[in-house]
């Protein structure tokens, strides 16, 4: 069942948003990427080895990329989402991964909360509950 069929926010969500806005804190980021995987040509799933904030910061620095919308762990989530879904396919290497991060978080017709908002929309659409109290 879609989670947007409710009239109220789930328990703990308002407190999370009061502390973090529509952005990833470390706990939410870690939970969000904990189930990210790649699927090979045979359909076999393998969980990704997550990219840490330090690794992503180093990658951005190495390729001379500065982010305008660098909030919490939003850009680190975008890096891991790209690694899971696009790296090795339409995103061919780390340099293009770094460029994807820039395009995603600094989307000119987007908004600063875009990474978290899209993640939450995916959770709503798939009926994936978030234990908001655990993310504080």
Image (cartoon, grey):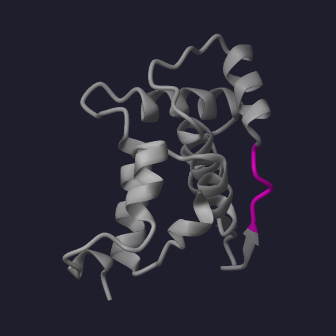
In terms of image quadrants, where is residue 108?
top left
Q: How many marks?
A: 0
74 or 12: nearer the viewer: 12
Answer with left or right where residue 65 lies relative to residue 109.
right
Q: Residue 63 appears at what percent x and percent y?
A: 68, 15
Q: Which residues are magenta?
A: 47-51
Q: Residue 14 appears at what percent x and percent y?
A: 37, 59
Answer with left or right where residue 45 lies relative to residue 71.
right
| Vertical comparison of 88 with 119: above or below | above
State the quadrant of the N terminus.
bottom left
75 or 84: nearer the viewer: 75
In terms of image quadrants, where is residue 6?
bottom left
In terms of image quadrants, where is residue 93?
top right
- Magenta stretch, main secondary structure, is loop
State the quadrant of the C terminus.
bottom right
| Vertical comparison of 22 with 57: above or below | below
| Vertical comparison of 97 with 44: above or below | above
For the view shown, which residue lies furthest in the bottom direction?
A: 1
What residue is drawn where x is 69% and y is 69%?
A: 40
Answer with left or right where residue 1 lies relative to residue 119.
left
What residue is drawn where x is 69% and y is 79%?
A: 42
Q: Residue 4 appears at what percent x and percent y?
A: 25, 74
85 or 58: nearer the viewer: 58
49 part of magenta stretch:
yes
For the view shown, which residue lies furthest in the top direction?
A: 64
Q: Residue 68 appears at what percent x and percent y?
A: 45, 18
125 part of magenta stretch:
no
20 or 87: nearer the viewer: 20
């Amino acid at each position: 069942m879609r989670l947007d069929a409710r009239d109220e926010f789930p328990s703990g969500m308002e407190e999370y948003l009061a502390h973090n806005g529509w952005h990833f804190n470390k706990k939410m980021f870690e939970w969000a990427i904990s189930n990210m995987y790649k699927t090979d040509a045979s359909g076999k799933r393998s969980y990704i080895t997550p990219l840490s904030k330090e690794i992503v910061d180093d990658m951005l620095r190495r390729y001379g990329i500065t982010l305008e919308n660098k909030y919490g762990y939003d850009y680190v989530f975008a890096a891991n989402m790209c690694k899971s879904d696009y790296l090795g396919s339409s995103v061919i290497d780390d340099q293009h991964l770094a460029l994807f991060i820039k395009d995603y978080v600094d989307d000119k017709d987007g908004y600063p909360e875009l990474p978290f908002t899209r993640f939450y929309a995916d959770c709503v659409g798939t009926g994936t509950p978030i234990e908001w109290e655990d993310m504080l």
